[in-house]
Amino acid sequence: MPVDKSKKVQVKVSMPKEIHRQLKDISEATGIPMSTMMLQATIEKYLESDRKDS
């Protein structure tokens, strides 16, 4: 299924090399792409902060 490029956004992230290495190791070990892991972590933090505000 092709991705409609008008409905997606590219995000670039800068991070310390050590964190990148650790994320890459985890990504390779789990088979989960780094971008997916970072997106999941972002959503989790957002939901966590939303629950604290309620």
Image (spheres, rainbow, N blue to C red):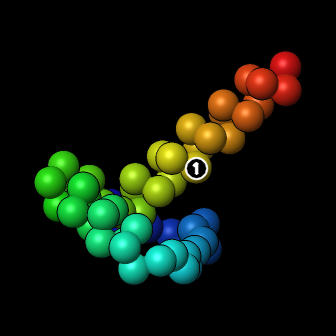
Looking at the rendered structure, the secondary structure element under dot 1 is helix
- Whether residue 10 is visible here, answered yes or no, is no
Which residue is disc 1 drawn over?
42
17 vs 8, left or right, is left
Q: Position of residue 44 (x, y in %)?
A: 57, 38
15 on left or right of 29: right
Asked whether residue 34 is in view, the answer is: yes
Quarter of the image for residue 48 reads top right
Count the marks: how many? Answer: 1
**Residue 54 location in percent, x, y?**
84, 19
Amino acid under disc 1: Thr
Q: Residue at x 66, y 33 (%)?
A: 47
What residue is shown at x 74% (from left), y 23% (from top)? 51
| Quadrant (top left, top right, bottom left, bottom right) of the N terminus | bottom left
Above or below 38: residue 45: above
Viewer-proximal residue, 26 or 32? Answer: 26
Q: Residue at x 40, y 68 (%)?
A: 19
Residue 6, quarter of the rendered image: bottom right
